[in-house]
């Protein structure tokens, strides 16, 4: 119960900060729409719809990277992370709260991005939406973890995509499979399995990333 | 001062500690085994009915791939030891094991490409599970080095590297599943649920080459760990 209250307080802090400063979400929205326009011109005329649904996944992963890159930067700059680590709460609560906040940003960006995608390219199916939600969970849990790792290094933002993209490849495979494959249930099951495995691993290991 | 230098890092002195097989013996065994395996592959193994002579690359390709997985597994195991038991050598051993895994992984990509070229006429085949999986792993573990050398030496570097190495062993089966899901299978299924898909001489020669490559990897690992520990010890002596 105590744990849930800690997570709630930390997540509320991130959401409030975003509501007041509006740092991340507007840039994500602008970015994802620009990416769609770039895609339109990089797909040769007459390309199939199948290619377009693959591109949606590229857009989602890169938009998420934008949010993940920002996630731990304020914590580092103002030394907030040191205080959070000293606070008498479980360290994994920091990770869980940050994942929830990032998920909220990503979901908000997608609420705009998916209809825009449907408008520009092709309608979105039900399994595709389910795939997007499940993949978002994986992107946010793993991405937040990797983001915390990256800010602990000298290279910081430079390192984040290098660490994150290989881990996101199974998510993209599952998501694209759910969008265009013949048997979406298998791919959705796979995405759920990925989420579960990596969430457990991140939850158990986060302590070692923030404690010096 | 000399006394301090000789006394203090006593637990570091025994560079080859815990290992029962001496390194020179290991090196000689390794040389004999690899020579034997090569001789068997080139002069004894029968030509494959379908693929002919070029199929012989299989003996090393599969052995190297298996060894590479084992190295990644060993790296994760040592990483777990580091996080769990705070074993003072585990971080270095984990790093060396992952390093070996990446070298062998690069060899898998190379031999796999050669085999793909001779069998299917293309250097790179996206529908080939194992090659794609090794590419993903190669990218993942290449980032391991970026991460490791972007943090100053110390407990934090050890922790971050260990956690990342643990992510690797989860990523291997997950990526494998994902790639299997997404592709039609043209990779030869050497091992199926019913055991090995071949018998007799081929199996024997495969097992010998597998063993040879494993001993080779272990020898290289031991050389590297010993060298790194000596290096560390030398630095400590210089500072003392």
Image (spheres, coloured by chain):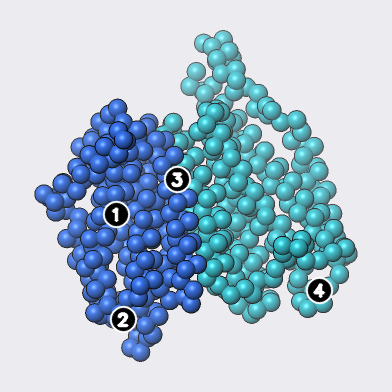
Q: Is residue B130 above or below residue B184?
A: above
Which percent across, then down, holds residue A59?
A: 32, 68
Residue B230 as seen in the image, left or right of residue A41? right
Q: Residue at x 21, y 68 (%)?
A: A112
* Residue A25 at least partly seen: yes
The crowd level at tag 2 (other Cα within 10 Å; few <14, some 14-19, many 20+) is some
Q: Is residue A66 left or right of residue B89?
A: left
**Residue B121 falls in which quadrant of the image?**
bottom right
- Spatial CA span between label 2 and label 4: 49 Å
Give coordinates of residue B21: x percent, y percent: 76, 33
Q: Which residue, given by chain and number where applicable, does mark 2 sit on?
A: A122
Seen as rendered, the residue at the extreme bottom is A46
Disc 2/disc 1 C-alpha distance (Å): 25 Å
Hey, which residue is sitting farthest front in the picture? A1
Q: Which residue is mark 4?
A: B48
Tell me the distance, in whole angstroms, between the alpha carbons under discs 3 and 4.
Answer: 46 Å
Q: Residue at x 43, y 54 (%)?
A: A195
The colour chain A appears in is blue
Q: Specify the colour of chain B.
A: cyan
**Residue in the foreground of this view, choosing between B2 and B18:** B18
Camera-side residue: A9 or B12?
A: A9
Element at label 3 = helix
Q: Which residue is mark 1?
A: A103
Query: Which chain is mark 4 on?
Result: B
Chain of the residue displaying label 3: A
**Inter-mark Cα distance, 1 to 4:** 53 Å
Nearer the observer, disc 1 or disc 4? 1
Which residue is disc 3 drawn over? A200
Report the Cα–Cα distance between label 3 and label 2: 36 Å
């Amino acid at each position: 119960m105590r744990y849930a209250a800690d997570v709630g307080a930390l997540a509320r802090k991130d959401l409030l900060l975003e509501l007041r400063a509006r740092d991340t979400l507007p840039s994500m929205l602008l970015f994802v729409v620009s990416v769609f326009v770039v895609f339109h011109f990089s797909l040769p005329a007459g390309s199939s719809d199948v290619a377009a649904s693959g591109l949606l996944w590229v857009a989602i992963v890169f938009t998420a990277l934008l949010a993940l890159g920002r996630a731990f930067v304020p914590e580092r700059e103002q030394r907030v992370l040191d205080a959070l680590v000293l606070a008498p709460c479980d360290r994994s609560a920091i990770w869980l709260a940050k994942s929830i906040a990032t998920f909220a940003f990503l979901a908000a960006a997608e609420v705009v991005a998916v209809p825009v995608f449907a408008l520009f390219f092709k309608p979105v199916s039900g399994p595709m939406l389910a795939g997007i939600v499940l993949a978002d969970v994986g992107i946010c849990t793993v991405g937040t973890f990797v983001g915390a790792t990256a800010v602990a290094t000298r290279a910081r933002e430079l390192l984040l995509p290098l660490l994150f993209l290989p881990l996101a490849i199974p998510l993209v495979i599952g998501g694209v499979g759910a969008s265009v494959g013949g048997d979406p249930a298998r791919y959705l099951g796979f995405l759920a399995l990925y989420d579960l495995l990596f969430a457990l691993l991140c939850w158990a290991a986060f302590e070692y990333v923030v404690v010096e | 001062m000399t006394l301090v230098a000789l006394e203090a890092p006593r637990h570091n002195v025994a560079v080859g500690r815990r290992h029962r097989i001496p390194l020179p013996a290991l090196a000689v065994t390794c040389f004999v085994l690899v020579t034997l395996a090569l001789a068997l592959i080139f002069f004894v193994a029968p030509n494959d009915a379908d693929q002919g002579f070029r199929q012989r690359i299989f003996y090393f390709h599969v052995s190297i791939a298996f060894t590479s997985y084992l190295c990644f597994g060993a790296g994760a195991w040592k990483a777990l030891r580091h996080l769990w038991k705070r074993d003072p050598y585990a971080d270095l051993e984990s790093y060396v094991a992952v390093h070996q895994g990446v070298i062998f992984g690069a060899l898998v990509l190379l031999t796999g490409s050669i085999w793909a070229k001779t069998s299917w006429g293309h250097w790179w085949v996206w529908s080939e599970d194992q090659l794609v999986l090794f590419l993903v792993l190669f990218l993942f573990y290449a980032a391991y080095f970026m991460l490791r050398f972007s943090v100053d030496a110390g407990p934090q570097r050890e922790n971050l590297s260990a956690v990342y190495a643990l992510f690797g062993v989860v990523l291997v089966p997950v990526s494998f599943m994902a790639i299997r899901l997404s592709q039609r299978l043209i990779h030869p299924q050497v091992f199926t649920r019913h055991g090995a898909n071949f018998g007799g001489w081929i199996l024997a020669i495969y097992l010998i080459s597998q063993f040879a490559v494993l001993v080779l990897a272990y020898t290289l690992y031991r050389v590297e760990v010993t060298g790194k520990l000596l290096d560390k010890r030398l630095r400590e002596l210089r500072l003392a």
